[in-house]
Image (tube, coloured by chain):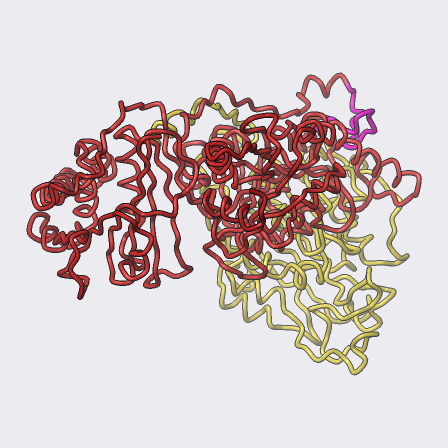
Chain colours: A red, B yellow
Amino acid sequence: MNLDLTIKIGGAAGQGLDTIGNVLSKSLLRSGFFVFSTQYYLSRIRGGHNTFQIRISDAEVRAMDENVDILIALDRTSVDRHLDEMSDGVVIVDRDVVELESEHDFIFHVPMLKIAKEVGGNKIYTNTVAAGAAMGLLCLDLNPLNEVLTSMFIKKGQEIIDSNLRVAKAGYDYVRENYPHGCKFNVSAPQAKRDRMLIAGNEAAGLGALAAGVQFMSAYPMTPSTGVLNYVAGHAGEFGVVVEQAEDEIAALNMALGASFTGARSMVTTAGGGFSLMVEALGLAGITETPVLIFLAQRPGPATGLPTMTEQGDLLFALHAAQGEFPRCILAPGTPNECFYMVAEAFNIAEKYQIPVFVMSDQYLADSLFTCDRFDTSRITIERHLLSDQELRIKHGDYRRYKFTPNGISSRALPGQEGVLVCADSDEHDEFGRIDESQENRIKMVDKRMKKLELLREEMNPPNLYGPRDAKLTLIGWGSTYGPLAEAVDMLNEEGHPANLLHFNYIYPMQAENVKEALARSKKRICVENNYTGQFARLLHAETGIAVSGRILRYDGLPFTPTSIIAALREKEVI
Amino acid sequence: MVSVEDYGEYETAWCPGCGDFNILKAVKAALANLAKPPSEVLMVSGIGQAGKLPQYLNCNFFNGLHGRTLPPATAAKLANHELTVIAVAGDGDCYGEGGNHLLHAIRRNPDITVLVHNNQIYGLTKGQASPTSERGMVSKIQKQGVFNNPLNPISLAISQDCSFVGRGYAGDVQHLTGLLMKAIQHRGLSLVDVLQPCVTFNKLNTFKWYSSRVYKMEEGEYPLDDRVKAFERSLEWGDRIPLGVFYTNEKPILEDNHEVLKVAPLIRHRPETGKANRLIEGFT
């Protein structure tokens, strides 16, 4: 990695940080860089202090860096708070707007408001000036930014596009002319590689759902899951999806079950608080054997907690939620790439095994922009596992929704198919779906449902090993921590501490033999999780008997960075 | 031809003499009269004595959670609007635990029938007050009598412009059958509140109590789309209790909003994975 730069944009909510951030991120991707962007924002519409951080490199980047090279400060707080994150960087600030007492040669004044008004004729162009200025400071070609602005404003007409391009160039030129020495970052754009994409976890999950043929989605908006709902709803008409905003999460999951029972591929999206309301219906999915995908984006709880921040605190909740015992499956993608393919796979698992399947994300994965290889829809299959009318005809009317079978899976017909009745019951029921409270039936039905887990367990992929196989130190993680952990492992190996990462994205049911095999060579196993109690380490122990030798836990609402992981390893004297 | 026999005969778990038997009779008769084959009918129910009704019918059913009949019924209709969807609930189920869903189902207006067995008491849990229990009714929990005002489901539904609002009585199967037929045929959400004596736990609102009070509204007393007149009539309760259709309107139904449903039921569409490629392009 030759180049590794971080640009931070700071300002108050309502100042349009995410617009500049997204425009710049996309422009830098188009310039050929690997880009990784994260947002830090508070739960408010106006004010507060928010940041948008963009890391660019000519090699793959999977996490954020704590060192800032370019700070675009839209308010005074940004300067006060983030100056000490810079070692040898530059601040871009409009001193006409932001009052600063100090004069430093690394503070570059760019009259963004003045340029916006004079060149664009409106102060709303301030952010585009800032984006142009940033491209100028990096001495990059302006074309990628022009392209991004053009496609962004295409619906608003040529006049708006032209004004944006003019002010972007003015910001760019201002910096090139007034701060020619700013080009010290020595950035040269790598050869553009257009088969990469820049995408957040939420959008990738929504895209995965659309590609996998979701037909019905019901949800109640809740940060950080709302992006998936927005994305699918935004394309619902074109893809023929029925999206229903429910009155509450209780209704949301009950709706999804009604639609799924009737034959629609169905999912809900929610966060922990909303999922708390879904718990009874989760059990209903369990006993009625109704397939459903629950996309659960975590945030710090309990109750309202930290609404806009990140945590991995709901794993054991998802695993144990609802009264009684029934099979379920939990997947936890580590990147948007995995979000895309795993959402699609989750639908197939749900419909094959007729169980609820969780795809667990969190605010960090939901909102951060990752550079990914272009998603390949030909890798996605839609497997419905439904009886055709013809198959039903062969049964001559003898259809039993909950027929006892060797693997516990009963074939699924739909209400409305000729000659059959499909009955589902939240009470314990017989093979036909009608109430049966006898002990004999109860045992057989529980056995039948739980048996499905055995077959599913065999189909679950083993954890992914990253780094040298024989390293003595193994970092263990699950879900969204993949990126920071992989980078931490790279850093450890570069520093002469042989280490690897065992990353879990197929969480439950867990195949103990696979995991034992993968961990056989490591002497020290450190589980790194974004929670207080080390939930995954507890699950790992329960399922495999393997105890970890240490835990690194973070529950301040922020994601791990590679350097924070290394620092924690030092503090614990692991290295 | 569809006959009442096609809807089957099952042994029930209801108390002898329960009003539910007559409701079951009326449901079978209404469906047979409308020539609805059992395989095209989906009953969605909650939990309670009312929620058991689909168990005693030959038809498709989804017997879900207490209070949650309307969300799955609404979604089932969206998934396959060729099905005749009937949600069955009790007063505790639909007006208590699931009260919020009723408000929002009325707002959405799916083309489903909501059949509420209103016995003004909790039967399955053995005799506690329900949202429609009379003020002052003494129960095991409400030892000093019920403090709260009873909910008036008819007024509530009319106030929210529910598409079809009617009241039947379990003591008059023939009238109830006719009412249910109208409700099922009506395009939009039809609420049918059925006064149903609970012979075991409600010693106040008995067959005798209801029979001496109920009367059938005459057709043409007021235009059925006159919401104010309908609301006024809905307030009548006590010595005289009106039965029949209170209010109807012809507003668009939930299914009308989705283009995809105009071609075929949702479940008959065959999604293609490659369709997402165009969206993927936008992220490069």
Q: Can residue A261 be seen by looking at this rendering?
A: no
* Tally of marks: 0
* Coordinates of residue A539 in the picture (x, y in percent): 70, 43
Above/below status of B213 relative to A407? below
Q: Residue furthest bottom?
A: B144
Above/below status of A115 relative to A136? below
Q: Which sits in the foreground, A491 or A114?
A: A491
Q: Residue at x 41, y 30 (%)?
A: A372
Is B219 on the left-hand or right-hand side of B241? left
- Considering the image in quadrants, where does the C terminus of chain A appear? top right
Indicate whether residue B9 is drawn in magenta: no
> For the magenta stretch, what is the residue range?
A395-412
Is A28 on the left-hand or right-hand side of B74? left
Residue A510's image quarter? top right
Secondary structure character of the magenta stretch overall: loop
* Coordinates of residue B248 in the picture (x, y in percent): 53, 56
- Considering the image in quadrants, where does the N terminus of chain A appear? top left
Indicate whether residue A404 is drawn in magenta: yes
Q: Residue at x 61, y 43 (%)?
A: A527
* Coordinates of residue A421 in the picture (x, y in percent): 74, 32
* Coordinates of residue A321 in the picture (x, y in percent): 69, 50
Q: Residue at x 27, y 40 (%)?
A: A24
Above/below status of B171 relative to B37? below
Q: Which sits in the foreground, B213 or A534?
A: A534
Is A49 on the left-hand or right-hand side of A211? left
Q: Can residue A524 be seen by looking at this rendering?
A: yes
Is A50 on the left-hand or right-hand side of A201? left
Q: Which sits in the foreground, A172 or A386?
A: A172
